[in-house]
Image (cartoon, rainbow, N blue to C red):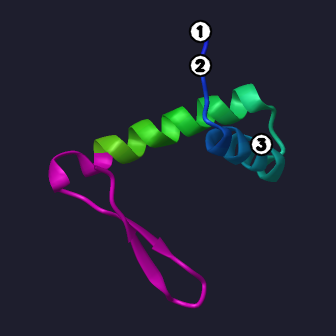
Amino acid sequence: MTVKLTSKSVDALNRASRLAELNRTDTINRALQLYDFVVSAVDGNEKNVLIIERNGKQERILFR
């Protein structure tokens, strides 16, 4: 499989790989699994994804 990534996606991949201490292939595999989980969870607008920071600040993530 060949994938053409935008420069923004390449930067995100490199940053995520570095932070997770994984190679880019493993990072892509994990990212796709997480994306599938999130999209399945919010399918039909029945659920939301909520990020809660340590200070209590909340941010709802929308996928459209």
**Which label's residue is closer to the chain start, 2 or 3?**
2
Please report contact status of discs 3 and 1: CB closer than 8 Å, yes or no: no
Q: Are marks 2 and 3 in contact (CB under 8 Å)?
A: no
Residue type for callout 3:
Asn
Considering the numbered disc 2 on the image, is that residue within a helix, a strand or a loop?
loop
Viewport quadrant of the N terminus: top right
The residue that label 2 is drawn on is 3
Where residue 43 appears, as percent x and y from the top left, is 22, 45
> Mark 1 and mark 2 in contact (Cβ < 8 Å)?
yes
Q: Residue at x 64, y 45 (%)?
A: 8
* Residue at figure coordinates x 68%, y 47% from the top left: 12
Give the residue furthest to the top. Answer: 1
User: Which mark is on residue 1?
Assistant: 1
Question: What distance separates the C-alpha of mark 3 from that of mark 1?
Answer: 19 Å
Seen in the picture, residue 11 relative to 52 is either above or below; the reply is above
Q: Report the amino acid beneath label 1.
A: Met
Please give the name of the residue rendered at 60% of the width and 84% of the height, measured from the top-left corner.
54
Q: Look at label 2 and name its amino acid.
A: Val
Instruction: Identify the residue under disc 3.
Output: 14
